[in-house]
Amino acid sequence: MSTLAISPLKNVGLCWNALDRAMRRPDHLPGMVALYGPSGTGKSMAAAFCANKSRAYYLELKSTWTKKAMLGALEREMGLPQSKTIYEAVDRVSEQLALSGRPLIVDEADYLIDRNQVEVVRDIYESSHGAILLVGEESLPVKLGKWERFANRVLHWQPAQLCDANDARMLAAVYPDISIEDDLLDRIIAASRGITRRVAVNLDRVANEARAAGWQTVSDRQWGKRDLYTGQAPVRGRVS
């Protein structure tokens, strides 16, 4: 998806405002912020856009990573040599974050809790006082709330928002050869339950169907009884 298509989306703006707030904070305020919400709301897309805009170091956590693997991936992202020990890696990463003045974005941040890596990130923050954006699922604030020393260093918790009509129009702009009417956009949003990824899937479905049918404009009436993607697997009919 093009930068022009994603930059005006609501969650991109919310993500950027949160990160910018951390980067511009006074020295006496904490420097971690969080963007959290349901899967498919475009959080990672927003984080990637903000990483490009701010030249942030970007780390997407994996479910299988140990502390050493996580730090090794971060060292590679920063262009640093691989450390032999965890404490050496924390020191190098923290120093690079402080010297560069660049923020750090940690995507899939729920794995910090699942893999017992919360204190590693807190150590990096304490040593660097850099701006850190955490991106995770809707339960992230509750999970991190159990780590009081960590949660107390979060400057701002930003909930991701569901896709609305304005976002849907921005996403539909990816298909300049097809005009999708507002009534069909409303139907798409309802079928998708506001989940941005599902809206994008439905827009692509509508655009492909319109091209096949030779339509330049598609309304709800034209779309008729054709299916829209809801995220649910189709139910198999009963075999007689």
Image (cartoon, grey):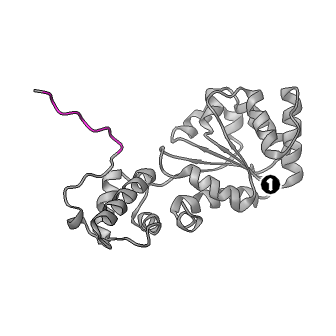
- Residue nearest the viewer, comparing 217 with 78: 217
| Circle 1 residue | 102
- The quadrant of the picture occupied by the N terminus is bottom right
**Residue name at image x 76 percent, y 32 percent:** 120
Residue 54 appears in which quarter of the rendering?
bottom right
Q: Position of residue 74 (x, y in %)?
A: 77, 40
How many labels sit on residues?
1
Q: Is residue 45 above or below residue 122?
A: below
Q: Is residue 27 above or below residue 64?
A: below
Residue 19 appears in which quarter of the rendering?
bottom right
Seen in the image, is 132 located left or right of residue 98? Answer: left
**Residue name at image x 80 percent, y 41 percent:** 76
| Residue 158 in sight | no
| Residue 1 in sight | yes
Residue 91 appears in which quarter of the rendering?
top right
Mark 1 secondary-structure assignment: loop
Specify start and end residues of the magenta stretch as a single range.
Answer: 231-239
Q: Is residue 96 magenta?
A: no
Q: Position of residue 226 (x, y in %)?
A: 23, 55
- Residue nearest the viewer, comparing 42 with 18: 42
Q: Residues within 10 Å of mark 1 (few under 14, many from 20)?
A: some
Which three-letter amino acid code belongs to the residue tagged 1? Answer: Arg
**Residue name at image x 66 percent, y 58 percent:** 50
**Residue name at image x 53 percent, y 66 percent:** 5
Q: Looking at this view, name the residue that lies furthest to the left.
A: 240
Q: Position of residue 55 (x, y in %)?
A: 75, 58
Seen in the image, is 213 located left or right of residue 164? Answer: left
Q: Position of residue 27 (x, y in %)?
A: 82, 55
Dominant secondary structure of the residues highlighted in magenta in the image: loop
